[in-house]
Amino acid sequence: MLGQLSAAIPAPAENLAPCDGELYLLRGFYSSNTADRYFQDLLHGLAWQTEQIQIFGRLLTVPRLMAWYGDSDAHYRYSGVGHAPLPWSGALLAIKADLESVCQHRFNSVLANLYRNGRDSMGCHADNEPELGANPLIASLSFGDSRLFRLRHNRSKQRLDIELAHGDLLVMAGTLQHHWRHELPKTRQIKQARINLTFRRILPAN
């Protein structure tokens, strides 16, 4: 899908999902110098905050820093917590334009996550909230230290491990969110800060 839609990709992207969805990895989507610049812009320019999510009726502190940006009507609710978007920053708008050109898809919001060290993590989940639509296309950019991104198939329990590095772009599409969950596990390795941006399109409320 992605490789066919965009001439901006040097070669057709391979679907890494063995079944039930689409998963594309573009190594070095941004050059090292460009990725360095964006990392500093985002690290010092976004309104990072500690958040709490509701799991089984309990409020738990999220083990990372987060920020939600987007169009004024791109309200998002996950894990029992609602998020009103902050206005786009210049760096986020520039990145969004690049991704929209490559993915041939319009995004109206982005979830930013800052993993400060190897103890920060993301639990296993699927991006399947109703406001994302039936088969959402999510473009995920990595800046900073590399981290392991793990996917698990809901039925077969098959596991895919992908090491995401500075400037890499991962695109999840098709029915992937129906059949796979993903996570960024903790690690005992010494890790420096990593920023992840997941661009999405939030559908208008009915």
Image (spheres, rainbow, N blue to C red):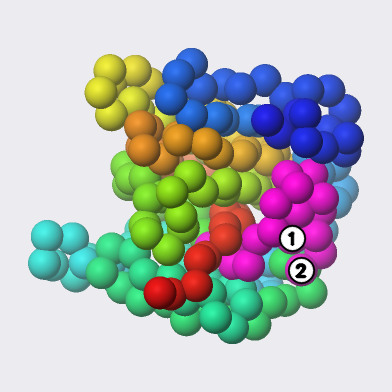
- Left or right of 56 on screen, residue 1: right
Task: State whether residue 174 is above or below residue 92.
Answer: above
| Residue at 61% from the left image edge and 22% from the top image edge | 15
In the rendered structure, find residue 96 and report the number of the disc placed on it: 1
Q: In the image, is residue 103 part of the stretch drawn in magenta?
A: yes
Q: Are the residues tagged 1 and 2 within 8 Å (C-beta)?
A: yes
Judged from this view, the residue extending furthest toward the left is: 57
Which residue range is magenta in the image? 93-111
In the rendered structure, find residue 93 and report the number of the disc placed on it: 2
User: Which residue is more in the foreground, 184 or 108?
Assistant: 108
The CA span between labels 1 and 2 is 5 Å
- Report the amino acid beneath label 1: Lys
Classed neighbour count for the residue bearing mark 1: other residues with Cα under 10 Å, few (<14), some (14–19), many (≥20): many
Residue 54: image location, x then y, percent: 21, 67
User: Which residue is more in the foreground, 17 or 192?
Assistant: 17
- Left or right of 4 on screen, residue 153: left
